[in-house]
Amino acid sequence: MQLWTHDRLFSTIEALVMQHSPSGMEAEINRYLLEQLAALGVEHWQDEADNIIVRIPGTRPDAAAGAVAITGHKDEIGGIVKAVGEVGRVSVRRLGGAFPWVYGEGVVDLLGDRETVSGILSFGSRHVSHESPQKLQQDGQAVRWEDAWVETKQSAAALTAAGIRPGTRMVVGKHRKQPLRMGDYIASYTLDNKASVAILLGLAEQVTAPPVDVYLVASAKEEVGAIGALFFSQRQRLSQLIALEICPLSAEYPIQPGPAPVLLSQDGYGLYDEGLNQALLAAADRANLPVQVATISGFGSDASIAMKFGHVAKAACLSFPTENTHGFEIAHLGAIASCLQLLVRYLKD
């Protein structure tokens, strides 16, 4: 068994980031995950809601009754095509919590039915007067999706032939998606939530013969309503659901950057289970891992949404501090590694 060093974590996250997976069009990352899990030789499958699931059977007689699920969503935010114009310009709207000013002008990929077309997310020229709509963006008004477009320099017929249509997904282009290593930090688009999927792969490799059944769920369509996790948790009897997530670094929250992960007590969807949180903190203490605790708003996870809708009795969210959330995110590899180590200890205990 390979040690999950910072180098290995970085390379695993890097490979996951480069697999496009906008909500509802996650086939590229699905193929990659299915290949990795087959190589590990663990029981796994893809369900009707497009979740990729690993089952690690428990050893106790009542192992199924006490089943625990760990989720990390595999979908990413981006855009969705609204209209295809006649001069190669494609109109897009947000998919999940995406803002055009976060991406800036640059290469994006349109995932057509038959071909991926790269174009430039464009806001218009700057050398203009009040006669041009772009002037407003220079004077304090944030650019909106309605003000932006994707310039493809292809005809409408060529775009149609590639399968670019209303509903086509747009994501940051692979041309500029490569993660950057900054010492012990990783900087990248879509750490939310490709880094958490890397933790799931680590768990699939390291957790064997737990007391209860463990389900590792790379969940689908989380960014548009935790759809995959709700489907799974409605059908599978669980005693606990723990979501792996990013945690936003902001002056309003008492969270420090660095190697200590964060356990949430509350988010925008409600309270997490205090008993489960205490059990996770006790596991962290046994493993000599520092953990921060926080309540945050403007945020939800597979776990809090599933608990709010009554799908699970106990839910928790274990996360790693992240700068620039839903943008070019920065996180400490040590915090991601600590999430993995904490859960390995908790599941074995």
Image: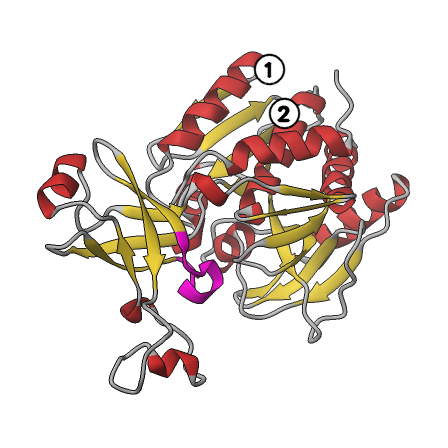
Question: Does residue 301 show up?
Answer: yes
Question: Does residue 70 show up?
Answer: no
Residue at (53, 26) in percent of width and height: 54
Q: Amino acid at mark 2?
A: Ala
Is the image coloured rainbow, by chain, by secondary structure, or in one colour?
A: secondary structure
Q: Mark 2–mark 1 contact, CB under 8 Å?
A: yes
**Is 12 displayed left or right of 137 in the figure?**
right
Q: Is residue 133 rendered magenta in the image?
A: no
Label 1 secondary element: helix
Q: Residue 204 has which mark?
A: 2
- C-alpha gap between disc 2 and disc 1: 8 Å
**Is 37 displayed left or right of 111 in the figure?**
right
Can you identify the residue that label 1 sits on?
A: 40
Label 2 secondary element: helix
Q: Residue 210, image x and y in percent?
A: 71, 25
| Nearest the eye: 180 or 311 | 180
Q: Is residue 102 rendered magenta in the image?
A: yes
**Is 171 displayed left or right of 316 in the figure?**
left
Q: Residue 74, image x and y in percent?
A: 48, 40
Q: Residue 175, image x and y in percent?
A: 45, 40
Q: Residue 92 has which mark?
A: none
Residue at (78, 43) in percent of width and height: 183
Q: Is residue 281 above or below residue 29?
A: below
Give the magenta-colored segment's residue range.
96-106
Q: Amino acid at mark 1?
A: Leu
The part of the image, by quadrant, that contains residue 346 is top right
Quarter of the rendering occupied by the C terminus: top right
